[in-house]
Image (cartoon, helix red, strand yellow):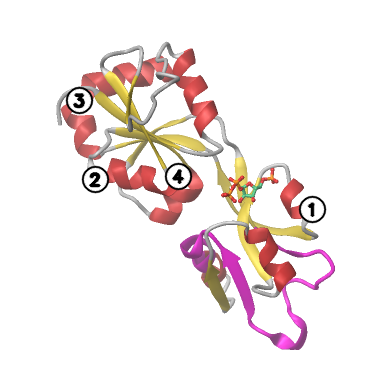
Amino acid sequence: MSGPLRIALAKGRLYQPAVARFAAAGIVIDPEPGRRLLIPSSDPAIEFLVVKPADVAVYVESGAADLGVTGTDVLRESEADVLEPLDLGFGACRLVVASPAAQPFPALPGGKTARVATKYPNLAWQHFARGGRPVEIIAVHGSVEVAPLLGLAHWIVDLVDTGNTLRANGLTERETILTVGAVLVANRASQKLKLEQHLRLMSRLG
Ligand code: PRP
């Protein structure tokens, strides 16, 4: 592990706030990277890569990236072994159980076992197991809110920010599983080997 600090950013809702946060720290990401996957910044000692949200922790845990910006939702779902040196203070939302507003909760008619659609099968499973409630988890990759409308699932476990998506699909928030936010994560070996660079970055972002 030598050379520039390589930082993995998640595509999607955390991308723009992350870019703004680095820019405020004087680290400006090349706004026109073209097809390059490793993106230089105004600081020659720092470069970026942009990956799917669930992959940030994979890159950082393996050491392919020194650091990453990720949400605690996908981080806890992955159980990746990474350091979390900094809470970045943006991307606040929550992971919740939601179900159709008109449907009784948590007991389903006839004592049926609930089917739960989610992008977070591990966190959902743990939540219901903690409560001793048997459920069937249905793992999907997006548009989770439509699952109860179509009869794919009775409940969902998904992120809520404004609540607009739940409301628009006739769903009500029932239980909070996790408070979510963006964090900086770091590879364990990298933090030891590049300690000075990590500390300098932390003080610029902190
Ligand atoms: C997230 C989440 C909800 C929505 C909640 O999806 O899965 O669908 O945002 O936001 P709201 O409470 O403000 O309506 P995202 O936009 O990240 O896209 P995705 O479904 O592709 O993950």
| The quarter of the displayed image where residue 191 is located | top left
Q: Nearer the viewer, mark 3 or mark 4?
A: 4
Residue 143 position, x and y percent, is 62, 57
Please indicate whether residue 83 sits to the left or right of residue 115 in the image. Answer: left
Indicate the position of residue 194 as horizontal and vertical percent values.
Answer: 20, 25
Query: What residue would you read off at disc 2?
Result: 62
Quarter where residue 118 is shown: bottom right
**Cβ–Cβ below 8 Å for labels 3 and 1?**
no
Q: Is residue 19 left or right of residue 178?
A: left
Specify start and end residues of the magenta stretch as a single range.
Answer: 97-126
Query: How many dots with numbers?
Result: 4
Q: Residues within 10 Å of mark 3 (few under 14, many from 20)?
A: some
Which badge, 2 or 4, comes first in the chain's sequence? Answer: 4
Q: Nearer the viewer, mark 3 or mark 2?
A: 2
Marks 3/1: CA–CA distance: 47 Å
Depth check, front residue: 205 or 51: 51
Q: Which mark is residue 53?
A: 4
Q: Amino acid at mark 2?
A: Ser
Residue 126 drawn at (x, y percent): 49, 66
Q: Nearer the viewer, residue 4 or 93?
A: 4
The residue singled out by tag 3 in the image is 194
